[in-house]
Image: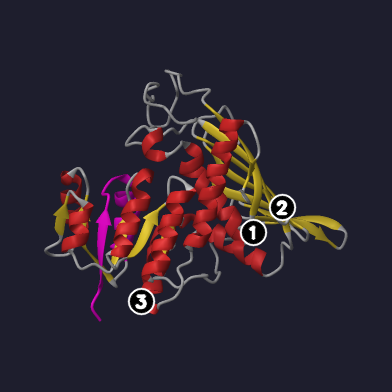
Amino acid sequence: MSKLKVGIIGCGGIANGKHMPSLAQVPEVEMVAFCDIVVERAEKAAKKFGAEGARVYADYKELLEKEELDVVHVCTPNRSHSFITVDALEAGCHVMCEKPMAINSAEAQKMLDAAARTGKKLTIGYQNRYRSDSQLMKQLCEDGTVGEVYYARAHAIRRRAVPTWGVFLNEYEQGGGPLIDIGTHALDLTLWNMNNYKPKYCVGTTYHKLNNDTETGNAWGDWDPEKFTVEDSAFGFIVMENGATIILESSWALNSLDVREAKCSLSGTKAGVDMEGGIRVNGIMHGRQYVTTPNLNAGGVAFYEGNGSSDPAVIEATQWVHAILNDTDPCVLPEQAIVVTKILEGIYESAKTGKPYYFDK
């Protein structure tokens, strides 16, 4: 069987750190075209990951016009996710778009509409779903162990880890800071485990308290205060239509030792489960409190077909390719991802207005 032909649009950090190395481990695909506005990056990617004769472009529209591709991976800054994805879908390609789905819900809706209109598959890069702790938590929720989840916390807290490269600090290109960058992962995990995608309203706060610091202790070196135009931390209180409550916390820089990223904690009617030190399950057994910590390194059955890798990014790429080949749904549905974007947008809007944001308007 011939391999799926993949094009990579955006050959920066996330493409080199996740998408291209992962696709390289999936035998059913070959990367045949690479695009970046800095053409040298595309040339370097083609040399390292490309199939023989792989071509390089500086304009993604030229790539879509000249190449006969099956799949496109969109790995560009947030602002361009929507229009590149829509154009790729219209060109007849299935699309994996890096998170978040889009810079706002209106742009995300365009992507969703284009996928429906073209009949092509669309998924978003929430690879943390494929971690062993995430998969076990999901199973505990689905098999009834946790019961009805009515309170949850989505954790995305860094003490001092502000990304100082690329356009992360640029509000125009990214749409925000830690909330839209890493808070999006924590919120996706939380909604997915709760299987609850119906928000009612939210209240949000954003802070620019540490942006102007100069001796920062930052993991990647001091940031430039003049370029740090996004929030350094953001927090949301979300109420779902069924009454469930979610607390979302996110920061790149915060004076806190409670550092947790891309994790969630769930409280249900039968048990609670969190991601501290792997997975902890707490509840009541025969009238006594218990805490149990399953061994994630021993045994276990993978939720999703894969190639045996334990790397969440490789599992993500493998299940995505198999969904295309087998004409099944990918794990991350765009209908789920757009809800994440809507909630993030609601938190930002609430922070601006100082009022609750209602989703039924």
Q: Amino acid at mark 2?
A: Ala
- The residue positioned 77% from the left and 61% from the top of the image is 270
Q: Answer with left or right where residue 71 lies relative to residue 229.
A: left
At horizontal 56% and vertical 58% (from top left) the residue drawn is 134
Name the amino acid type tagged 3.
Leu
Q: Is residue 100 visible?
A: no
Circle 2 residue = 244
Q: Which mark is residue 325?
A: 3
Pick the front one: 43 or 245 = 245
Disc sitting over residue 356 in the figure = none
Q: Picture coordinates of residue 228 (x, y %)?
A: 41, 27
Please give the residue where the numbered disc 1 appears in the rendered image: 194
Q: For the magenta stretch, what is the residue range? A: 1-25
215, above or below 80, in the image: above
Task: State yes or no: residue 39 in magenta.
Answer: no
Kindly give the residue lying farthest to the front in the view shown.
361
Marks counted in the figure total: 3
- Per the model, the C-alpha gap separating discs 3 and 2 is 37 Å
Q: CA distance from mark 1 to mark 2?
A: 10 Å
Foreground label between 3 and 2 = 2
Assess whether mark 3 and mark 1 are in contact (beta carbons under 8 angstroms): no
In this rendering, the label closer to the viewer, 1 or 2: 2
Indicate the amino acid at tag 1.
Met
Residue 206 falls left or right of residue 43: right
215 sits to left or right of 6: right
Q: How is the image coloured?
A: secondary structure
Mark 3 and mark 2 lie on one chain; the one further toward the N terminus is: 2
Q: Is residue 7 magenta?
A: yes
Element carrying mark 1: helix
